[in-house]
């Protein structure tokens, strides 16, 4: 179907935003990893196991959302980028992890902060639908457990801040459509975050 002329600038902006967002992830993923750390092997293996579990939970949520894509027209990347900005859905960076000089304190802090952010975003999606509720609850609990694992290791290394972080303002999903769109975006962003986290943790465990 032809796009009306009035919508063309918005489409162009959406595509530019999509390209910008994808480039940020690509740069982080392609940057060489730094030298291995002295993190306990037991901690790294536990983290890898938790990442795989959350990835499975996230994939299950995405699979259930796929059937709703066509109905609510959520499958087009440029539309999702616009929705991400209109709903104010943030994403968590891992810029301190895949670098030529891996910053251990910064990396663990970003891992924890990112998991804490996604925990809040998943909580904001509560009530998305009766069918997705149990999967969302499981995903939320597993993300919280992984965040706790990271925090405890930071405490063991004397890296943890004096106080646990507090959750900032989360997007307000005011309709079923927004919760579904938010679910698609949050699940996708979480999976990309976990892919980068897994790469870093596997590098450290194998070194």
Image: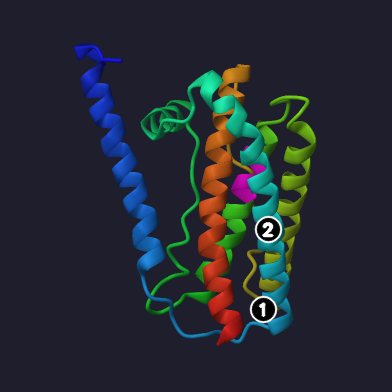
Q: Which residues are magenta?
A: 116-121
Q: Are marks 1 and 2 in contact (CB under 8 Å)?
A: no
Element at label 2? loop
Which percent across, then down, holds residue 154? Answer: 66, 71
Mark 1, residue position: 157
Identify whether 185 is placed above or below 161.
above
Identify whether 68 is placed above or below 31.
above
Which percent across, then down, holds residue 178? Answer: 56, 22
Left/right placement of residue 63 relative to residue 53 reads left
Element at label 1? loop
Residue at image coords 27%, 25%: 11
The kind of secondary structure the magenta stretch mainly shows is helix
Which percent across, then down, holds residue 101? Answer: 40, 79
Q: Quadrant of residue 20?
A: top left
Can residue 172 be seen in the rendering of this structure?
no
Q: Is residue 118 magenta?
A: yes
Q: Is residue 141 magenta?
A: no
Q: Residues within 10 Å of mark 1 (few under 14, many from 20)?
A: few
**Which numbered tag is attached to residue 163?**
2
Residue at the extreme front: 1
Q: Residues within 10 Å of mark 2 (few under 14, many from 20)?
A: few
Residue at image coords 66%, 31%: 125
Left/right placement of residue 40 relative to residue 36 reads right
Which percent across, then down, holds residue 173? Answer: 59, 23
Q: Quadrant of residue 12?
A: top left
Q: CA distance from mark 1 to mark 2?
A: 15 Å
């Amino acid at each position: 179907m032809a796009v009306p002329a009035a919508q063309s600038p918005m489409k162009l902006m959406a595509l530019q935003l999509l390209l910008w967002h994808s480039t940020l992830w690509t740069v982080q993923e392609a940057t060489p990893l730094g030298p291995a750390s002295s993190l306990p092997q037991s901690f790294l293996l536990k983290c890898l196991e938790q990442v795989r579990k959350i990835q499975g939970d996230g994939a299950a949520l995405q699979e259930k959302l796929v059937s709703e894509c066509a109905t609510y027209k959520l499958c087009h990347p440029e539309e999702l980028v616009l929705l991400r900005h209109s709903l104010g859905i943030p994403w968590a960076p891992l810029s301190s992890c895949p670098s030529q000089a891996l910053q251990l304190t910064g990396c663990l802090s970003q891992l924890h902060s990112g998991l804490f952010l996604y925990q809040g975003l998943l909580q904001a999606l509560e009530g998305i639908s009766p069918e997705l509720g149990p999967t969302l609850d499981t995903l939320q609990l597993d993300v919280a457990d992984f965040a706790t694992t990271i925090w405890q290791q930071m405490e063991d290394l004397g890296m943890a801040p004096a106080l646990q972080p507090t959750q900032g303002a989360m997007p307000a999903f005011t309709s079923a459509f927004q919760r579904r769109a938010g679910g698609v975006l949050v699940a996708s962003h979480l999976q990309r975050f976990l892919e980068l986290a897994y790469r870093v943790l596997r590098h450290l465990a194998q070194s």
